[in-house]
Amino acid sequence: MDILKGKIAIVTGANSGIGETTVKLFARQGANVVLTARREDKLQAVENAIVTSGGSALSIVGDVSVEADCKRMVLKTIKVFGKIDILVNNAGIVDKHIPITRLSTQWYDEVIAIDQTSVFYMTREALKYMEPARSGSIINVSSIGGIRANSGMAYSAAKAAVIAITKNVAIQFAGKGIRSNAVCPGPTPTALNTPDKIATFDAEFSDICNSHMNLSLPFPSTEDQANAILFFASDKSSSVTGQILTVDGGITL
């Protein structure tokens, strides 16, 4: 199916994990995808894979925690494609389950900048072009940590803020052709939570957080998350806005 045929979609953090799976799915569904991330080599590899498979892709290297980079990435998209139909704010980092009593100001600021402030920057810039067109779908990738605060202090705060941003934008643009929704992934195997990365997490607080989840259930895949994002991006959800969809396989029930 080509349910995104002719659509222009920006996906941040598109060089790995949920972002990579999402841009490849979007391309298969007919979208022209704009990939953004900080690592040029990996970003180019994803673009090449999409183009080789017959899709349309443009990669733009940039740091979404930097306001000027966000403006540049959006402007480049407009220059090349003339519009933005879909924005997926996916870029983010994990905060190693560090609790407030062991959290440095520097690490807190870094997590907030990448996981929260970037959503503000990218959304504001995209809306400059979506609003006059009275059309657009914004999908933010939050987390179960944003709902239940069962992750590190900084990550929980950032992802909760992403949910608030999602709903706030939805309120402003309800009935004006622009939708804003969020997906909240549960534990999903990506490069951010490989065994070697998990070994660097705060073990004590990780155990406390995990005690509130049923980790015996199967973890969702990046494909599960991408399919949820695709639903919000497509016209199949044309009457859906301000909604928060948890995709965790029931782990937090």
Image (spheres, rainbow, N blue to C red):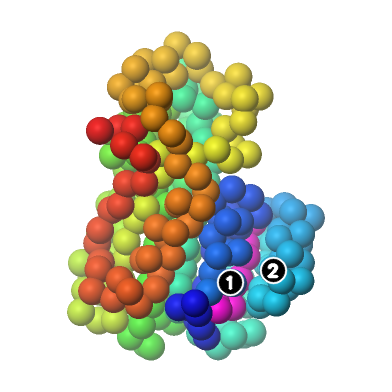
**Is residue 210 visible to the viewer in this orientation of the structure?**
yes
Q: Which residues are magenta?
A: 30-37
**Is residue 165 visible to the viewer in this orientation of the structure?**
no
Q: Using the image, determine if residue 150 lies above or below residue 55.
A: above
User: Could you say which quadrant of the image residue 157 lies in?
Assistant: top left
Q: Secondary structure at mark 2?
A: helix
> Residue 2: which numbered mark, if any?
none
x and y percentages locating residue 190 in the rendered image: 58, 40
* Residue topped by disc 2: 50
Q: Residues within 10 Å of mark 1 (few under 14, many from 20)?
A: many
Q: Secondary structure at mark 1?
A: helix
Nearer the observer, 60 or 9: 9
* Cβ–Cβ under 8 Å for marks 1 and 2: no
Q: Image check: 145 left or right of 3?
A: left
1 or 2: tag closer to the N-terminus: 1
- In this view, the residue farthest toward the right is 41
Q: Quadrant of the C terminus?
A: top left
Amino acid beneath label 2: Ile
x and y percentages locating residue 21 in the rendered image: 58, 56
Magenta stretch: residue 32 in it?
yes
Q: Image check: 127 left or right of 39?
A: left
Nearer the observer, 177 or 26: 26
Amino acid beneath label 1: Arg
Q: Main secondary structure of the magenta part?
A: strand
Cα gap from disc 1 to disc 2, whole angstroms: 8 Å
Residue drawn where x is 42% and y is 15% of the image: 207
* Residue topped by disc 1: 28
